[in-house]
Image (spheres, grey):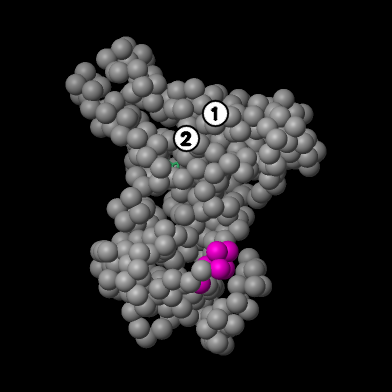
Amino acid sequence: MIPPTHLLSSFTNIYHHPPTLIAYAPGRVNLLGGHTDYNDGWVVPVAIDRYAWLAARPSTSDMVTIHALDLDETASFNIHQLDDKLDTQGRPLPKWVHYPAGVAWSLQRNDLKLTGFDAVLTSTVPVGAGLSSSAAVEVAFAVIWESMMGWQVDRMSLARLCQSAENLYVGVNSGLMDQFASLHGVLGNALFFDCRTLAWEAVPLPENIALVIADTNVRRSLGDSAYNERRAACEEAVRILSGHLPNITALRDVEVHDFETHQHLLPPIIQRRAEHVVRECARTLRGVEKLQAGDVSGFGTLMIEGNASLRDLYEVSCPELNALTEIAISLPGCYGSRLTGAGFGGCTVNLVEQAHAESFAQKLSTAYKKQVGKDATVWICQAAEGAGVRGMEGE
Ligand code: GLA
């Protein structure tokens, strides 16, 4: 893993010392299990070779100063004064700083000691594109503090601490999938993760298959009420259904046939949201069996079905995402295509026969431009390892 060269040179230019540590944390795509994680369901994410990079040098103060290279902005906060979300000058922290400040808040709330440091942050995960740019930033800060302070927390607990930062400090009620994937990625593998039991296993991706990401270049904001509204609808469905299915505590517990029997009890919008989740949970379990058996075509068909459900029942797609998936599945060598992340814009992920991958990427961009009038960004990605920290020798 080679850090971007401008990360090191910028650090030295800004702080007049080289960094002592470099952390990297990958983004992810999600092949199956859309909006199932916060319903205690199953997901199949893949950590990708796009990273949040953080160079740091501990200081003796309580201040964390971060220069964000991609924004050309610097902000500082005091690790012991986080509740008001103000910087060291008493001004509101910029939104991007809520993620590292939230991690500081969450770690300390769990009795983990921190120190201040100087840092430079840059990321190759496009922001707000459904590739977990925010989880990657959270995880990079968590692992760099772990390394600086010498405490050790198992990776699943660290993922949950980062999720708490996002839920309780940033205010987005996201599930655990993104932080889990960023910390647990396995080279060349997808990850099959049970969001209730927290059990997981790596599932090898066939070697002749390429993962192609296509960015609509349309942006949404996760903080938008739409995501939290979806989660609230699922909770409401559980509340109503549990009057008739007493053993359920989450939509993951609802079998498809029980749902079909009781769905008339739900108001129409809640019914559609819950139907997506119940069927997507079943689809994810079926899909993993197919992937484990090397049936890429069967797995891809389930990705396409899952995408239709996200579009029609969960209503988190948009015309640009629909155009990208429709074009993709009409192209040679494409097994499956679906939106990834929360939706409302951002990226699709496509499973494509390796031999067709380059021409697939080209044809997809051309047809998208012609149909939508916008430029898509399309690239072939690799299934990557999870987050890590490297010491800079001699520092
Ligand atoms: C976002 C959230 C995840 C998950 C996905 C949808 O990426 O952060 O927890 O809910 O949306 O699958």
Q: Which residue is mark 2?
A: 34
Compared with residue 60, is residue 281 higher up or lower down, i.e. above or below?
above
Q: Position of residue 66 (x, y in %)?
A: 47, 72
Mark 1: amino acid: Asn
Image quadrant in which the N terminus is located: bottom right
Marks 1 and 2, Cα distance to the nearest angstrom?
Answer: 8 Å
**Whether the residue under disc 2 has CB within 8 Å of ligand 1:** yes
What residue span does the magenta drawing correspond to? 67-72
Ligand 1 occupies quarter: top left
Task: Name the foreground residue: 31 vs 240.
Answer: 240
Reply yes or no: does residue 53 show up in magenta.
no
Left or right: where 156 falls relative to 83? right
Which numbered disc covers residue 172?
none
Mark 2: amino acid: Gly
Q: Which residue is mark 1?
A: 307
Left or right: where 346 falls relative to 257? right
Compared with residue 83, is residue 277 higher up or lower down, i.e. above or below?
above
Q: Position of residue 47 (x, y in %)?
A: 55, 50
- Element class at badge 1: helix
Reply yes or no: does residue 70 show up in magenta.
yes
The mark tally for this picture is 2
Q: Position of residue 370 (x, y in %)?
A: 75, 32
Neighbourhood count class around disc 2 (C-alpha, 10 Å): few under 14, some 14–19, many 20 upward:
many
**Cβ–Cβ below 8 Å for labels 1 and 2?**
yes
